[in-house]
Amino acid sequence: MALRPADGAGIAAAAARLRRGGLVAFPTETVYGLGADAGDDRAVARIFGAKGRPRFNPLIVHAPDLAAHRAWAVFDERALRLADAFWPGALTLVLPRTPDAPVSRLVSAGLDTVAVRAPDHPVAQALMRAAGCPVAAPSANRSGRLSPTEAGHVAASLGGAADLILDGGPCPGGLESTVLSLTGEVPVLLRPGLVSRDTIESAVGPVETAGPALPGTLPGTPLESPGMLAAHYAPRAPLRLEAGAAQEDGEALLAFGAAPTPGPASGVASGYAAVRNLSPAGDLTEAAANLFRLLHELDALAPDAIAVAPVPEDGLGVAINDRLRRAAARD
Ligand code: TXA
Ligand code: MG
């Protein structure tokens, strides 16, 4: 595994690796992805092996823009409107595959749909344009673990499984894309993410979230969302959500907002093993950007548990709470 700065030479080397069937981790505006040439069955198969990911969980295909994605995905009028409004950006659309789509069937995991996204990050854009192929990329972590928002997280989680890791610094968004299915009459939100439901609804009208739950999924998880198992994004330490003032032995604290954060900086006494704050100002965008990094940091200290302060359930808070609930769920 080689970690390289995401400069011109690093990007050229990464593009060459992709074209030869290699696995390349790269930054996006959401989280780091583990990329492979989506047209290459063997390369895509290697992604599942590297992550320990179940084969029934399909992958997102990344390309620079709408024009490229039209070769493998069928865009109806709604999809065109959403791509126009949100791409490049953190919205993934699940669409029907075109006949003879030039992307591996493995990315669709047996479905007749393909998930597509055009990332808004200069390194991701430069890499995809240099490689000249569609890039299949899940988040660059072992399956079920915390998503990586820094190159070091990728190296720690995947070790030698990636042929090359492009270090482009921390991901500005810090949370994955919103996944929206457009295969039925009404758009269905499969995963809340950086693009809020409200902004999507202002572009295409009402969006559904409800659906029958699979065993091991959270209530409201639609059947057609195979990747949304409840226990996901799991740190090693158990999480205690909606933690109030009371504290238990051996806990670390993940705080949010202006409530006095115990610790030397504030002078508030604390028996917490460690304290981090998602956003002292109570800003949800900042909290999203910090979420996985701070969970990685606290988890590395091996506390008995991580207590998490309440985060408001609106705007980006919906996606933050979704990830926290999954991180707290145990099989
Ligand atoms: O922000 C992101 O979306 C990041 C960056 C790297 O782009 N990628 C990412 O990929 O989070 P991953 O594999 O960790 O999550 C993709 C989600 C999974 O829940 C998967 O089940 C769902 O998208 N998905 C992919 N293809 C699908 C399809 N054809 N139908 C339904 N769900 C799909
Ligand atoms: Mg993931």
Image: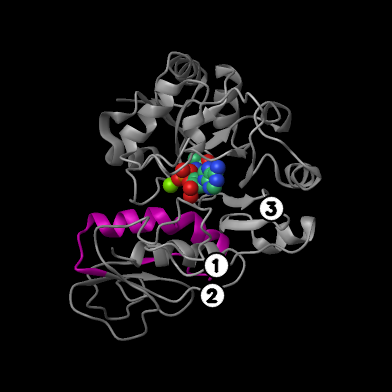
**Few, some or many residues within 10 Å of mark 3 (<14, 14–19, 20+):** few
Is residue 62 located in the magenta-colored stretch of the structure? no
Residue pictured at 71% horizontal, 30% vertical:
70
Q: CA distance from mark 1 to mark 2?
A: 6 Å
**Mark closest to the chain's N terminus, 3 or 2:** 3
Query: With respect to residue 263, does 141 lie above or below?
Result: above
Is residue 283 located in the magenta-colored stretch of the structure? yes
Kindly identify the amino acid type of the residue bearing the numbered disc 2. Pro
Please tell me which residue lies in front, 192 or 39: 39
Q: Secondary structure at mark 1?
A: helix
Residue underneath mark 1: 317
**Mark closest to the chain's N terminus, 1 or 3:** 3
Q: CA distance from mark 3 to mark 2?
A: 31 Å
Measured from the top left, where is residue 48 in percent x and y? 36, 35
Nearer the viewer's eye, disc 3 or disc 2? 3
Q: Quadrant of the N terminus?
A: top left
Residue underneath mark 2: 312
Query: With respect to residue 227, does 318 lie above or below?
Result: below
Query: With respect to residue 4, does 180 lie above or below?
Result: below
Measured from the top left, where is residue 313 in percent x and y? 55, 73
Contact check, label 1 and label 2, Cβ < 8 Å = yes
Kindly identify the amino acid type of the residue bearing the numbered disc 1. Gly
Please tell me which residue lies in front, 3 or 263: 3
Residue underneath mark 3: 184
Query: What span is colored magenta in the figure?
Result: 276-305
Q: Quadrant of the C terminus?
A: bottom left
**Few, some or many residues within 10 Å of mark 1 (<14, 14–19, 20+):** many
